[in-house]
Amino acid sequence: MGSIKWKMATLYMALVVTVMISSGVFILFTLQNNSYREVFRQNEYTAERIVDIFGMQTLSEEDTPQKVFGTILTPLMIENINTSAGGDDTKDIYLLSDRGDLIYSRDPDITTADLSSRALIDVQSGQTMKKIYVHKLTDGNTVGDYALSFMLPQNKQSYIIFIRQSMTSVENNISRLTADILITTMIGITIAGVLALLMARSVSRPIVELSDRTKQLAAGELVVEPETGEGAGAEDASKKGKGKRVSLKERSTHDELDQLELNFNDMAVELTTSINELKAMEQMQKEFVANVSHELRTPITTIKSYVDTLLDSDLEDKEMSRRFLTVVSHESDRMTALITDLLELSRMDAGQIEKKKEPIEMGRLMLTCLNDLEWDAGKKGQDIEWAQDVRLKDTNSDPDSLKEPYGQYWILGDPRRIEQVIRNLLTNAIKYSGEDTMIYGGIYRRVRQDGIAEVWLKVQDQGIGIAPEDQKHLFERFYRVDKARSRSMGGTGLGLAIAKETTEMYGGRIWVESKLGEGSTFWTAFPLTDPPQDTDTDGGEDSGSSLGYEGQEAGKEEAGHDER
C-alpha cells in the first residue's frame, strides 16, 4: 500500500507543478506581449508626432528636409514627444529616403546591417507595421525597430522615419518576474509536497484497513477492534463484535472507511439476493421438469391404456377400434405439439434462434390469419369481425361516406414467428368462446408517450374471462387457468409463453385485459418501421379480405390504452 501512497503523492505533485509552470509561462508570455505592444504604441505615437510637425514646416532652398528634420529632433522637442508617448528607454531616430538612403541622423549613423532590419524591409515593400520588431544586436543588446513611411506635402516626396528603441527595461522586468515566479513555484511545490503526503496517507489508511476487513468479510465476519485509550467500552465492543458481522452503527466514528464497509456489506446483501435468485431459478427448473414429465406422462398413459385395451379386445369391433384409435391419434398430436413447443422454448433460452428481421405488413398478416381460422370459428357458429383505424379523405365532405383505411402497418420481424403469435391468440379466442359468439380482430396505429409509433393488434373473445389473480401468471410456462379444460382442448400451457418471448424478441409487448363473465382482450404491440421503397403504402388493395371492412373507428375500444 506504500506504493499507492507514493503514487498518489507523485500524481498530486505532478498536477501542482504542471499547473504552476503553465500559469507562470502564461503570465510571462502575456507580460512580454503587453510590453511589446506598449513599446509599439509609443514609437507609433513618436513617429506620427514627428510627421505632423514636419508637415507644418516651410521648406526652402536653405530649409532643406535634412535641416528641418534636425530642428525637429532637438533634445527639447524629442523630450516633449517621448514624455507624451511614455517610456524612458533610449530611442535612435533616423530620416531615410524611400530607397533607404540616410538623410539625417541625430544619433549614431545607421549601418548597412541596420538597413536590413525587417521593419525597414516591410515598410519599403508597402506594408504597414502592426507590431514592433524585436531582435538582438551583435553587442548582445535587445532592441525594438519601428518604421513609418510618409509623404511630405511640400515637395511630394516619400520619406521613412526609422526608430530603434532599447528594450532593456522590458527585459529587466521580465527577468525579475521570472525570478519571482521561480521562487514562488519552489515554495508552492514544497507546500504541495507536504500536503500531498498527508492527503495520500489519510486516503491510503482506510484502504489498508479495508484490505484486512475484506478478508473478514469473505469469512462472514466483521470485527470491531478497540481503539487505544477507549477503555472498557471499546473492549466490550470488541467482545461483542468478535466472530460475527456487526452493524456499522456500533462504530464510534463515521468516515470513508465506514462507507466502504457499508458498500461491502451491501455487496454481501446483493450476493445473498443473487444466491436466493439462483435457488429460485433452480426450483423453477425442477418445477419445469416436473411439469414436462406430467404433461408427457398423461398422453403416454392414455395411449398405452387404449392400446392395451385394443390388444385385449376383439379387434373385429371396428367402431370401438376407430374410437380408440381416434383418442390415440389425438393424444399423439397433443404430445407432438408439446414437444414442439418445448423445443421452441429450449432454443429461445439457449439463444439458438436466428432473429430474422424482414419487413412485414401486419394488416395483411392479420387478415390472412383471420381468413385461415374463419372455418374453425364457423364450426362453432362464431363470427369474426375485423376493424382498423380510419381517416377522412376530405375533411370538407361528409365524413361518414369518406372513411378509408389508414394504410399499411410495417414492422421488422420473422413472418413465421409473428404469424405464430397471432394464430395462437386467435386459436385461444375460438377455443375458449362459446358457440354463436363473436371474435373481434383489430389493428391500430398508436404513438407512445416517448414518441415511438406502434402497431397494436387486438384479439377479443366472448369467453368466460380470466380472474385478476390469474392474469399476472397467464404468460408463465405451463400455467393454465382451468387445467382440466385446457388439456381437453389440446392445450400445452406453453403457447402464451412462446408468444410473449417472441413478441419481446422483436421489441414488442403483449398483455391481457379481462373480466370474469365478460370475455378477454389480448393486445400485442410492435414498433412501426418505414415501408419498403417499392411498396405502395396507400393500403387500398392489401387492406381488404373476404371478411369485409367494417369501417369501425378504434376510439371507443381504445379509450385509456395510450398511456400503457
Image: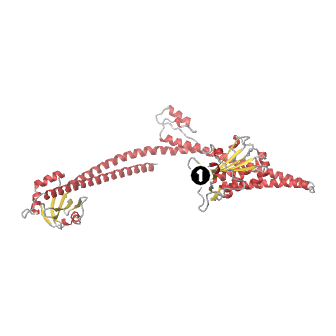
* Residue denoted by label 1: 394
Q: Is residue 245 above or below residue 148?
A: above
- What amino acid does circle 1 point to? Asp
Q: Is residue 78 visible?
A: yes
Question: At numbered mark 1, what does the secondary structure look like: helix, strand or loop?
Answer: loop
* Near-viewer residue (93 or 514): 514
Colour pattern of the rendering: secondary structure
Where residue 521 sits: x, y (%)?
69, 46
Please report the residue visible at 27 percent of the width from the left and 55 percent of the height from the top.
33
Count numbered badges in the picture. 1
* Near-viewer residue (436 or 468): 436
Where residue 558 sits: x, y (%)?
64, 45
Residue lying at the far front in this picture: please name it. 397
* Near-viewer residue (65 or 291): 65
Q: Is residue 250 above or below residue 120?
A: above
Residue lying at the far top in this picture: please name it. 232
Q: Does residue 402 appear left or right of residue 234 in this picture? A: right
Residue lying at the far left in this picture: please name it. 62
Where residue 120 sits: x, y (%)?
21, 64
Crowding around mark 1 (Cα neighbors within 10 Å: few <14, some 14 to 19, many 20+) is: few
Residue 46 falls in image quadrant? bottom left
> Which quarter of the rendering shows the C terminus?
top right
Q: Is residue 307 visible?
A: no
Where residue 456 sits: x, y (%)?
64, 50
